[in-house]
Amino acid sequence: MLQRPKQLAAFTLVLLAILAPLATTGVAKSVATIYRTIAQTQPKMVKIYGAGGFRGMEAYQSGMLISPDGHILTVWSHVLDTDYITATLNDGRNFDAKLVGADPYLDVALLKIDAENLPCFDIKMTVDAEIGERIITFSNLFGVATGNEPLSVQHGIVSVKTTLDARRGKFKTPYCGPIYVLDTVTNNPGAPGGALTNRSGQLIGMLGKELRNSQNHTWLNYAMPIADIRKSVEKICSGQLLTEHDKTLIKSKGQNLTMSDLGITMVPDVLQRTPPYVDHVQSSSAAEKLDIRPDDLIVMIDDQLIPSCKSLNTRIGSIDREETVRITILRDGKLLDFNLRTPSEADR
Amino acid sequence: MIKKLLLAILWISILPSSPSYGNADLEQLEQAAFQNAVKCVAPSVVRIETIGGLEQVQNLRFGTGATTGLIVTSDGLIVSSAFNFLNKPSSILVQLPDGKHKPATIVATDNNRMLTLLRIDPDGPLQVPKYSSESEIKVGQWAIGLGRAFDKTTPNISVGIVSALNRIWGKAIQTDAAVSPNNYGGPLVDIKGRVIGLLVPLSPQTNSKIAGYQWYDSGIGFAVYAKFVKESVERLRGGQDLFPGQTGIIFAGANPATAEPIIASCISDSPAQKAGLKKGDRIVEIDGCKISRASDVKESLSQSYANDTIEIVFSRQNKLVECKVRLGHKIVPTTKAKLKKSSTGPKAD
């Protein structure tokens, strides 16, 4: 009788010795996850070489395999503007890559190499990232990696998810859609086309072209969500040309609005950033009926800040004459909203 | 006995996994903590938009993008980085976390800690943040920066650690979290969402108004200590701009970190000269703080402003002397000093 508890005790101690290191903390687990993620992701990454190499235009960028038979997703750029594109895999093998197609509107390109059974991302299985989520990026920044060297890995978090809005000329890129802003410096030569994954290696996005944020002239560290470029990829894969892309966003339907349509004359635009003050309101105009007055400062149109007369003209010019605009005015330290509409011919 | 022993062993073997975080992924928990910290302070972080203003300041192009501010009083005082208003905008709008726009006016600017105080007229009481006590801040702890440059509803965040304390002559905390125009004026908070400082561009080398901008997003970022922010707000709400305090003392030697605090000269008509300080005096104490190097003087003075009066203890011919110096704003060598120099010239001839 006495023997058994002793054996049990000994057994428990052995068990404890085995389990203790596993159970201690989550640190071991976290570290294991990132090692595994990197090991599994690197073979899916590609170094791409093409045109460039002069006047600060690097001749390389990054890409990722998205099919076992050699489809490579990357960004559309000058690097691909040649008949000789080379794709170097993680194991060092070089392949001539063919451009299958590109979507210049989204800055997405698809390449194809003749190979089989390659490790790859499944772009149908992408995930969203939340703000504050820890992420990893894989890119050939500055062309540091060559041959069979793996790409550079960086870590950080998702800083914010926001929208690149090309229509308002906020960012000088044809891509306009949601982006992930990252808190790590991913905006490097050679990095475009790199992968953004979460800590367990699920694909979230693709690093975009080097870009300055025209709002404050800083370099923008960002990635485009794969979910948003998947459609483009599918269209390119199925051989559809993407010239018929949804251009409604950038093309106005009818005639554009002007301030004089609304009966407002602005102060002369003489400064770098002339504050958009109303100089004169035409009698019996839409503006006068709403009691818009000279010296009113127009601060927002449709909730969009108007920092100067120049941006007022750009903004107003992108609005259709038929639309109603909401103008926010600063008068005597108070914000006032007005809904203005161009009077139709019949009204006149 | 054995049963008890067994129970004890079993208890011990269960223990490591019994706390709720034992088996969870530490990184997941940290991530959740970052997000919670952001949630705590986000209602006190506002978006600032400006109208008009210069396009360029000291060769630096200014964008028209939104910047960030931190609510400091529930009745509408908001503190931000002075950098955000260097281009002298003609009008300022503040967008509160609930989306409402309010016109704002500049109350005053602190040109020493590079902070600008704004005032808005809110509809109701605003949410002020919680502050971390200075003694709790340790190098290596998590530091999260918040801004509202990108999105109207969600703050942009960056995560790093506290890299160093008492930087820029004791004014600031250094962090490796990404700091840039995207979050200048926003708070740097700890893992509990308590404000430890306000993000501003700073540089130890120069006092230029855009100093420190060149380090944006580089892993070298600064936040003015929360206690200094609060102190500045109290002084700025009176409406007077604050300037760094100047004495007019010049020390010998190129490196203030190694130079002895012995006065090489006092600029003519400067506060130091008026207080009776002379060449050869060794500064021993300023406002009760011991001074052993010329750099200590600079650090001690960085806490004070023009028109503040400081107490200097110095030794002259092995005697300790105390004097009061009323700090100046701009110290310009006067024509009197120049005349003196030229009058010594002909004598040599």
Image (cartoon, coloured by chain):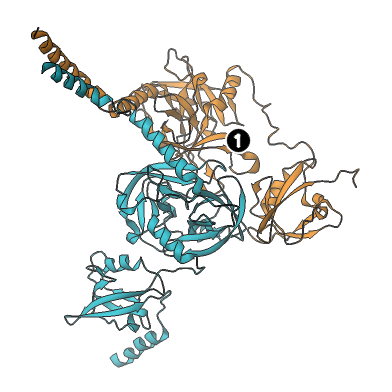
Chain colours: A orange, B cyan
Is residue A143 in view? no
Relative placement, left or right, of B57 versus B270 is right
Q: Is residue A339 left or right of residue A142?
A: right
The N terminus of chain A appears in which quarter of the rendering? top left
Quarter of image, res B278? bottom left
Q: Position of residue A274 (x, y in %)?
A: 66, 59
The residue at which mark 1 appears reads as: A176
What residue is shown at x 20% (from left), y 19% (from top)? B10
Vertical position of residue A270 compared to residue A39: above or below:
below
B126 above or below B237?
above
Nearer the observer, B104 or B206: B104
Q: Foreground: A59 or B108?
A: B108
- B312 above or below A335? below
Q: Secondary structure at mark 1?
A: loop
| Residue at figure coordinates x 55%, y 52% from the top left | B125
| Residue visible at 69% across and 45% down in the picture | A302
Residue A8 image offset from top left, x and y in percent: 14, 12
Residue A253: x %, y % from top left: 77, 36
User: Is the residue B106 above or below the residue A121 in the image?
Assistant: below
List the single residue furthest toward the top: A1
- How many numbered callouts? 1
Query: What kind of residue is marked 1?
Result: Cys
Image location (x, y in percent) of residue B336: 39, 87
Mark 1: give few (<14), some (14-19) or many (20+) Cα within 10 Å: many
Q: Say which quarter of the image contains residue A331.
A: bottom right
Q: Answer whether residue A52 is visible to the viewer in this image.
A: yes
- Subunit of mark 1? A
